Amino acid sequence: MMQSTSPVAGGGFQATGDRPWQAVLDAQALASLEQLDPTGANKLVSRVLTTYRSSLARLLSQLSTARAQSDHGGMKLVAHTLKSSSASVGALALSALCSSAEQAARDGRHDALPDLLDQLETEAVRVDAAVQKLLSEK
Amino acid sequence: MTLPYAFDPEDALERPKVLLVDDDEVQLMLTSAAMRERGFEIVEADGGEKALSILADWLPDIVVLDAVMPGLDGFDTCHEIRSTVGFENLPVLMLTGLDDEASITRAYTVGATDFFVKSQQWSLLAGRLRYVLRSSHTRMELERSKAKLARAQDLARMGSFDWRKPHTTSGIAAAGGLTLAPEALRVFGMSPQDVVTLRTLIRMVPTPERRGMLRVLGDVHAHSTVLAIDVPVQLPDCRMRVVHVEAEPEFNEHGHGVGYTGIIQDVTDRRVAEDRIRHLANFDTLTGLPNRRQLIWRTERALDQARRGGHQAAMLLIDLDRFKVINDTLGHASGDELLVEVARRLRGCVRHSDQVMDGALESAGVRSHRSLEAVGRLGGDEFIALLPEVLDEADAERVSWRVLEAMRDPIFVGGQECFVTASVGIALFPRDGTTVADLMRNADVAMYSVKNAGRNASAVYSPMLAGRGREKLELETALHKAIERDELVLHYQPKIDVRSARMVGAEALMRWQRGHTLVPPGDFIPLAEETGLIVPLSEWALREAARQAKIWSVNFGFADAIAVNLPNRMFERSDLVEHIHQSVSQYGVPHRAIQLEITETGLMKDLQNVIPSLHRLTEIGVEISIDDFGTGYSSLAYLTTLPISELKIDRSFVRDLGITPQSSAVVTAIIALARSLGLRVIAEGVENLRQMEVLHRLGCGVMQGFLFSRPIPPDELERWLQQTVLPRKAPWIVQASADRVDLTRTTGGFRP
């Protein structure tokens, strides 16, 4: 779901220019993520981000397999799963690309898929880098 | 049915257990964290297979399922959960994407309780979870309460139903119809698979009741009123049951009746119990006939109907004759048996109806009062026949004759045949009374007139009878008190041996000194016999005679017997011998001081029952004399074997002696008979010398009668002996002397 339509001021994440991941990850989404573990005692954000990275790697590999085999169902499932978890960590652009790809797969617009998935893979690399950067700051 | 939080729902809802299923690890982690923070206890599963294996041994309050998952997806998992026993009602919340309408529809199809769109707005998800838990809890409560109701209804043999009128909505005709809850179907002995229409049920009502029921249904429907009726039905297995139907009309927004909703209940057991109570209250337990209460109720209704219809009604009071004797001699068990048989016969004398339908009385038309006609038992040996409509007196009399005729055949009870007769009194409405009490009283008066006239007949009431009845009632009351008030006295008439001109005994005769008048026996003995007072009266007479024998033996050496008249029923009493023994012992006189007289008619009427007493009396020395001999129909064969000592020639033969040749022939025959049987013979009612002379010539020397002395008080008798017999002054002594009588012995005391 698109959280960006109703912007709320984030808590721990400042929208300042010296943080390069800001262009990729939504601060507000990250702020609400942080609220699930306000004291940081459970290191929830770190654990979620770590899990996201491994999940992202796995899903991207599944995607390339599916693309190689022209498995539209497989493509759709990857897009679907990546859509919501990306939204959760604030990777809104990636989530939007996933949504479009999933919809195209569902609608049977298979010719639109390669372009969308290319964009998706490109954005995924950016997101992974941003998440890695964010984790190193934690 | 599984009730995860049946007994402590509040506690369970405080920290609800959630099974969270999502293949997306990130999502799983986030949702868990968010829900834990909001008070839920979370168990995670990363796929459908994992979820099912957790559910195998753990029961959450709710399952949250991601719809799209690799492997077993959310839909399949939900379907699996639903088909597992115990999880039919486990709440399942399906998470789908906002843009995925197909999934939403599919979620419901596979049995999800609700769906929710995936979102990062955790409080919305938590709210939805709590809502689903609450509504699921409410639904379980409802299911439980429905189950309880169904169970209760089953126990009460009760079930609900709905009936819709066929109707037309916006030009579209809709069929009406009957819907029965499974419990209601069971009441009718049917299963939920059976197709039951209103027509099916109506056909189960037996034909005689069906019309009445349809009329009630029609009325109720026409006026949209509340329905409450009991209907007999024959179930498919042929059992008859009574079903109570109670329903209220339902109305649409325009106020038109659209149907009925209500319950039916099997009330057979209650009805049976009620009927039993009603029967006990209204019917005599011995004979099964209507009892006094029921008779009065029926008569009241019959009189109402007669008043309205302007016709006559009749009441017949039927009283068995001498029932008490039967009861006393054969025992109560035999008496009861006899009453049952009498009841059976009486029932056949009228158009007896056991049941009167209350409702039928009002509605069944002009002849409905006929169902009131019945024979009932008032109590004891008294019965009543109620004839709700008679044309005239003769109509009622015909029924009374039928009653008398019905008694004619002997009734076999207690190992022997009994002949029973009845006395019937008839009273007519409105002529002889306009109330139940008046009719009963006057039927009673008429019945008593029959008893007085010799029983075994019927009589219609007339005001003349009533006067006599009242007089008799007063007499009866007074007689009851006569003994305790010492109003009874014995007068004595001497028995004379004319050859020796001696008194050889005396007959005691009862008199009633009522105020200043001396009531002769003929005026009260029959009443005493009828009422049973004769028993204490006779016992008193025996004691009094013994007392007198003692006084006379002291005063002038009296050593003969005083004869006491006893009715035959006294001889049937087993305690008679004992009673005589006590009487003589009390006054120190021998048993032979008492002699008993029984009339020939009385003796023969009940010979079998009397004979044992006669034997025992003779054994102890009490002699028996047969009174009024020659008037009855003695069996000569019996006479030779009976333990008797004396025959008393009836006064009617003595009166005609010397006037008609027949009388002297009879007297000659009696004397010859007595002589050949070795019996003494005595003539009573001797009033003149001519009679004495003839009797003497024919061979009868002992006599009593006005010629010698009328019955007189005991002290007067003593004076008579002193002043008349001893001085040998009376004309009969002179006459007797002339007839070669030994005059040398002159005392009144000794017998040759």
Image (spheres, coloured by chain):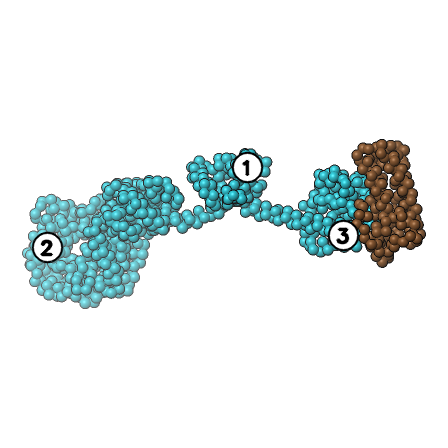
Chain colours: A brown, B cyan
Q: Which residue is mark 2?
A: B687
- Residue found farthest to the front: A17
For residue B286, side relative to residue A55 (left or right): left
Q: Nearer the viewer, mark 2 or mark 3?
A: 3
Say which chain tag 2 marks: B
The reply to whether label 2 and label 3 mark residues of one chain is yes
The residue under the point 61% across, 48% down is B148
Say which mark, if any, is on residue B169. Answer: 1
Earlier in the chain: of badge 3 and badge 1, it is 3
Chain of the residue displaying label 1:
B
- Residue plotted at (78% across, 51% down): B122
Query: What secondary structure is found at the residue carrying circle 1?
Result: strand
- Please state the total of marks drawn on the protein image: 3
Residue B511, placed above or below residue B177 = below
Determine which of the numbered discs, if any, sits on residue B22 in the image: none
Q: Which mark is residue B123?
A: 3
Question: Marks 3 and 1: CB-CB under 8 Å?
Answer: no
Amino acid residing under circle 2: Glu
Q: Secondary structure at mark 3?
A: helix
Q: Quadrant where the N terminus of chain B lies?
A: top right
What separation in Å lies between label 2 and label 3 (alpha carbons)? 137 Å
Query: Are the numbered discs 2 and 1 placed on the same chain, yes or no?
Result: yes
Amino acid type for the residue under numbered disc 1: Thr
Residue count near mark 1 (Cα–Cα under 10 Å), binned few <14, some 14–19, many ≥20: few
| Residue B695 shows in this picture | yes
Q: B643 and B397: which one is in front?
A: B397
Who comes first in sequence, dot 2 or dot 1?
Answer: 1
Do labels 2 and 3 touch, CB within 8 Å?
no
- In which quadrant will I find the C terminus of chain B? bottom left
